[in-house]
Image (cartoon, grey):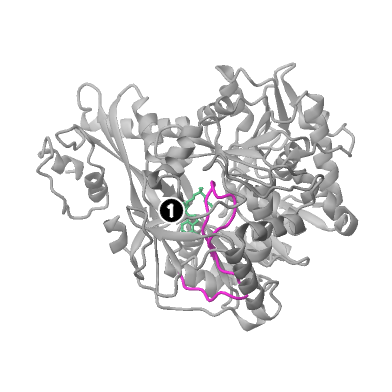
Amino acid sequence: MSQNIESVLHEQRVFEPPVAFSRSARMQAADLERLRREAREDPLGYWARLAREHIHWQKPFTRVLDDSAAPNYRWFTDGELNVSVNCLDLHLTERADKTAIIFEGEAGDVRKLTYGQLHAEVSRCANSLRALGIEPGDRVVIYMPLVPEAVVAMQACARIGAVHSVVFGGFSALSLKDRIEDAGARCVITADGGWRGGQIVELKAATDKALADGCHSVEHVIVLRRSGQAISMQEGRDHWWHDIVATQASVCEPVWVNAEHPLFLLYTSGSTGRPKGIQHSSAGYFLNAKLTSQWVFDLRDDDVFWCTADVGWITGHSYVAYGPLAAGATLVLYEGAPTYPDGGRFWRVCAAHGVSIFYTAPTAIRALMKLGDEIPAAYDLSKIRLLGSVGEPINPEAWMWYHRVIGGGRCPIVDTWWQTETGAIMIAPIPGVTATKPGSCTQALPGIEAEIVDDEGRPVMAADAGGYLVIRRPWPSMLRTIWGDNARYIETYWSKFQNRYYVAGDSAHRDADGYFWIMGRIDDVLNVAGHRLGTMEIESALVAHPRVAEAAVVGRPHEIKGESVFAYVVCKGQRPSESELATLKIELRAWVGEQLGAIAKPDELRIVENLPKTRSGKIMRRLLRAIARGESITQDVSTLENPAILEQLRGG
Ligand code: PRX
């Protein structure tokens, strides 16, 4: 931990919320104060009131929190609802003709769906799933490009009580297979292909590959025609979306599910090999997704909200597929790469569709910042009134650029800290109220009791002293468990402090104003371009290669991606000759891409004879990290079994 603590920067700038923004903000200082007080004085009464006001219950709940099996908490346990009804049907009286989704494909094709049309499409998709025999509780894997049908498929699952598990389209066939098998999915919804960077991402081919050896639970595959290239369809198993969905009725009786019924699984990397199927509930998840959409993004009826995340990540769940729809917003969906065909694409989309709230990741901001101020200056970004950031700490330089160049100096920036596991934003400014500081996610939202504790679980009081970021009380949208592995749920998130706090896995500190500054992960998880990658996962992928005996993966700071993947590899048998080395490195990178997906490919690969180990056989990761970062080695290397390898590890 001490290493992290030292790396803290001291940012002094403070930005008060712009007066013009504050004046018409949904939440005013007095409102926030009232919520905080209510949450403090009666936490359960507070969540119960919000759940009554913000959720349409088919059967109202009488019990707020069941903690009898803590830390497996359950919320609003005897209530019944349907999330899709809450996102869509409730808007049909007032917003049936309001645009729900503005879609832009990478090739420039634009399609708009009103709430009425979205509701009809979701109903048709839900009916087709039902026609295939999908029952409440069945798992449906969604492996799609970022097109409206991806949101439709998610909402359709919610409508019939099926549990979706979205797998990011950039993941490989093998990753898809692992996730399908872990979830025991009965159905996969995919597309022939999607567009990314001018190339077709071959989703159906990857699905076929995943299903070719294994995935015996899958009975049906629904295929959306998107890219139009030739694909193979397996008779009886594979169905075209336009055949099976389009022909269904546009109304679909929802299935009322229990509040705790799983809405979805979403796999995320952990510090050990296998990805974890994070399981979310229906009511609790929905409640926080909706509230935070309104509180943090100040969503109003005339806003055009663009969260650039793919639905393959949690951000694309809470702030694309659920939260903004629950709030009745108009959202933008863009299929492709941020810099295709040029670095102005994001700003062109903002200008073309009148985006007023823009939410993206620091890695994208840094990449676009590098291209210079002239590119965004060429577009009319005057409609933007609020900016958001998520996924990793935003460095003050990128924050200032975002503020000045994209926000024209007039927009608040909401730096939102949260995780796949938390379901919704936890620590973030309220844009009309909270003064912001570049690089800080500011304060916990009302009802969220975030704290920093030391190794013994004692609150860290001193300003600027670092520690573990924990959440002291359960909250409605918290993960319920890890699918099929409750022991791992308890071990990963609770056991460190004897089940007293939820342990986020991040280190953080608070400054004299009580603002939170996130410093990074404390486990072996990398944050590459805002995406979580477990070092173990990449290591297991590497050692699965016939030439690899051992591998160690560490992160190294990267100017644009935040962190990059640095791999040390020991080969089986003889050390490859100089001429073999280059080809082997290329092969290993491609191999990891195939095993896990392109985002996991090592940026740097060093082939060495040995890994540094202590005499007890533990890989000295801290040493490897220091070497990867080109830092001088301060730690004791006297326990190193083979001190001579240091030179080789350094690339000498
Ligand atoms: O380390 C924190 C970082 O991203 C992790 C969660 O990753 P994931 O589950 O993939 O969800 C990302 C999108 C919610 C956290 O443990 N992180 C996320 N947001 C921030 C952040 N670090 C600093 N500041 C943030 N705003």
Quarter of the picture containing the N terminus is bottom left
Where residue 550 appears, as percent x and y from the top left, is: 28, 29
Residue found 17% across the figure and 37% down from its top: 614
Where residue 491 appears, as percent x and y from the top left, is: 43, 38
Can residue 169 be seen here? Answer: no
Q: Main secondary structure of the magenta part?
A: loop
In this image, 621 relative to 269: left or right?
left
Residue 72, above or below 37? above
Where residue 195 appears, as percent x and y from the top left, is: 63, 42
Q: Label 1 belongs to which residue?
A: 561
The answer to whether residue 430 is magenta is yes
Residue found 59% across the figure and 51% down from its top: 315
Can residue 226 be seen here? Answer: yes
Quarter of the picture containing the C terminus is top left
Q: Residues within 10 Å of mark 1 (few under 14, many from 20)?
A: many
Quarter of image, res 612: top left
In this image, 14 relative to 553: left or right?
right
In this image, 382 relative to 337: left or right?
right
Residue found 35% across the figure and 54% down from its top: 557
Quarter of image, res 353: bottom right
Q: Hey, what amino acid is under mark 1? A: Lys
Residue 488, above or below 18? above
Residue 356, above or below 547? below
Where residue 85 appears, as percent x and y from the top left, is: 80, 46
**What range of the chain is rendered magenta?**
415-438
The answer to whether residue 456 is magenta is no
Q: Nearer the viewer, residue 626 or 103?
A: 626
Q: Secondary structure at mark 1?
A: loop
Q: Nearer the viewer, residue 122 or 209?
A: 122
In this image, 295 relative to 474: left or right?
right
Question: Cβ of disc 1 within 8 Å of ligand 1?
Answer: no
Q: Nearer the viewer, residue 446 or 399?
A: 446
